[in-house]
């Protein structure tokens, strides 16, 4: 499968715990995006990278959230001290010079 | 703030009929519009896009219409099939395909056999 890969597919955690998600973009895609989606809503932009540089962060991305793309390939999204309001689908997308290709997401449930 | 939204939350159509899904946007600076389809348990999948210098674009069984005067976008699906059942989102960007997208709320398309 050469699409965008996200792991894990599902994550259940207790409030206050830290979680980390991984995204492997399509090979040679220079841009990588993180979105968050809640039930019935469209995805909301969180942040994006061009190669290893994080170029934009949404105001939705509080200081508990951090994203990295250290070598310009895969990316990680970490949420510290999770809250119930963090429960959502976290989607990753990548692109080169055209459309965004989305992964299947990581579904986070914070109990 | 700027927003992109859909008029109806659900749409039910008979298999073989044509479907029309509508979307309104408020950012007059938007230059690029996209329709995505999302099936259960999957990420959004690109369907068709259109730039602001066009008012119509056709793909295979799908047509996107853009009315900049009233800031309205629609997706037409010809001969709707059961496999078209999904949630559909419109999205917009001020700069183009390879940039941050603002999505509207989803509309569920249900195809009756």
Image: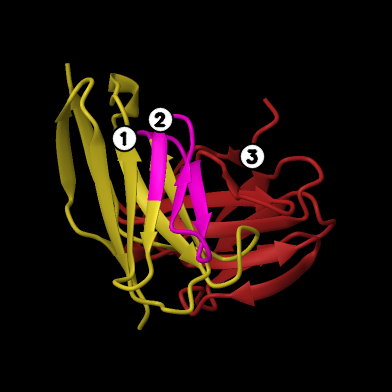
Chain colours: A red, B yellow
Q: Secondary structure at mark 1?
A: strand
Q: Quadrant of residue B72?
A: bottom left
Q: Secondary structure at mark 3?
A: loop
Q: Would you name the residue on which mark 1 appears?
A: B86
Q: Are marks 1 and 3 on the same chain?
A: no
Q: CA distance from mark 1 to mark 3?
A: 20 Å
Local packing at callout 2 (Cα closer than 10 Å; few below 14, some 14-19, many 20+) is few
Q: Is residue B85 left or right of residue A89?
A: left
Tell whether position A38 is magenta: no
Q: Would you name the residue on which mark 3 appears?
A: A4
Q: Nearer the viewer, mark 2 or mark 1?
A: 2
Q: Secondary structure at mark 2?
A: loop
Range drawn in magenta: B39-64
The residue lying toward the viewer, choosing from B33 and A79, is B33
Q: CA distance from mark 2 to mark 3?
A: 26 Å
**Hey, which residue is sitting farthest bottom in the picture?**
B1
The residue lying toward the viewer, choosing from A98 and A15, is A98
Q: Is residue B42 left or right of residue A23?
A: left
Q: Would you name the residue on which mark 2 appears?
A: B61
């Amino acid at each position: 499968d050469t699409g965008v890969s996200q792991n894990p597919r599902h994550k259940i955690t207790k409030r206050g715990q830290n979680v980390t998600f991984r995204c492997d973009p399509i090979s040679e895609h220079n841009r990588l995006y993180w979105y968050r989606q809640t039930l019935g809503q469209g995805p909301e932009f969180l942040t994006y990278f061009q190669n290893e540089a994080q170029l934009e962060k949404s105001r939705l991305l509080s200081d508990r959230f951090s994203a990295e793309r250290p070598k310009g390939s895969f990316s990680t999204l970490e949420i510290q001290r999770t809250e119930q309001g963090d429960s959502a689908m976290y989607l990753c997308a990548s692109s080169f010079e055209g459309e965004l290709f989305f992964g299947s997401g990581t579904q986070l449930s914070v109990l | 703030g700027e927003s992109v939204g859909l008029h109806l939350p659900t749409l039910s159509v008979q298999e073989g009929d044509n479907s029309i899904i509508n979307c309104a946007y408020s950012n007059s600076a938007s230059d690029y519009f996209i329709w995505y389809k999302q099936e259960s348990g999957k990420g959004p999948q690109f369907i068709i896009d259109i730039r602001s210098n066009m008012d119509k674009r056709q793909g295979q069984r799908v047509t996107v219409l853009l009315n900049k005067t009233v800031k309205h976008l629609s997706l037409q699906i010809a001969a709707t099939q059961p496999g078209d059942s999904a949630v559909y989102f419109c999205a917009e960007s001020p700069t183009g395909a390879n940039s941050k997208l603002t999505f509207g709320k989803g509309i569920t398309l249900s195809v009756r056999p």
